[in-house]
Image: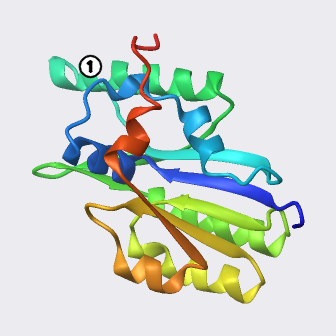
Amino acid sequence: MTKERIFIQIDGSNFYHRLKELKFKNLLSLNYQKFAKSLLLSEDELILSKYYIGAIREQEENLKSKTLMANQIRLMNSLKMQGWQIGFGHMLKTDTYHEKGVDVLIATDILIGAYENLYDKIILISSDTDLLPAILKAKELGKKIKYVGFSHKPSYAMIAHCTSKFLLRKNEIEKFLQQTTIT
């Protein structure tokens, strides 16, 4: 089997919400590096790992925003120490907060990497079907896209349109949670 150049992309908000649905706590302790390596075949070459998230901004006199921002900074520091790059969108506040720009960043990286032949396969941890046009174009250009979703809430559209799939179960994720929080 030939060695493939792998680009791993995690849609941070999507990943976070699926983990919360599984009742995981202390998500700052997840070892993302070991998790990513578990998704590779032994002969694969991991060329890039990138985590995408809406940047939280602190609001004056808002304790919750300060706590959320502090936790996000801890997560970003942990990811960077584990060799991950970060793609930042932003958060838009209406009645609630909405992440903006993250899907565009992910899709742009899929397309740039496909056109510039930077990878052979993407391992995409996102169930966001907004990414399908970029996925389909990358496949046209000969790239493989492996959808990694969750068994409790799979995206059937992603399963149908990606080259391959892997659905995570709770027990497969538990082994990547460390006993103590990374600070």
Q: Residue furthest left?
A: 95
Image quadrant in which you'd find residue 108: bottom right
Q: Of 99 and 47, which appears nearest the observer?
A: 47
Question: In the figure, 141 relative to 100: above or below?
Answer: below
Q: How many marks?
A: 1
Compared across the picture, whether 59 is left or right of 35 comes to left
Compared across the picture, whether 8 is left or right of 166 comes to right
- The location of residue 43, given as percent across then percent down, is 83, 53
Question: In the figure, 182 relative to 90: above or below?
Answer: above
- The location of residue 100, given as percent across then percent down, is 38, 56
- The location of residue 106, given as percent across then percent down, is 56, 61
Crowd band around label 1 with a 10 angstrom C-alpha radius: few (<14), some (14–19), many (20+): some
Compared across the picture, whether 132 is left or right of 64 comes to right
Is residue 155 shown to the viewer in this render?
yes
Q: Residue furthest bottom?
A: 140
Image quadrant in which you'd find residue 177: top left
Tell me which residue sits at (69%, 75%) in the image. 144
Q: Which residue is mark 1?
A: 66
- The location of residue 18, given as percent across then percent down, is 29, 51
Secondary element at image label 1: helix
Which corner quadrant holds the N terminus? bottom right
Is residue 88 shown to the viewer in this render?
no
Image quadrant in which you'd find residue 150: bottom left
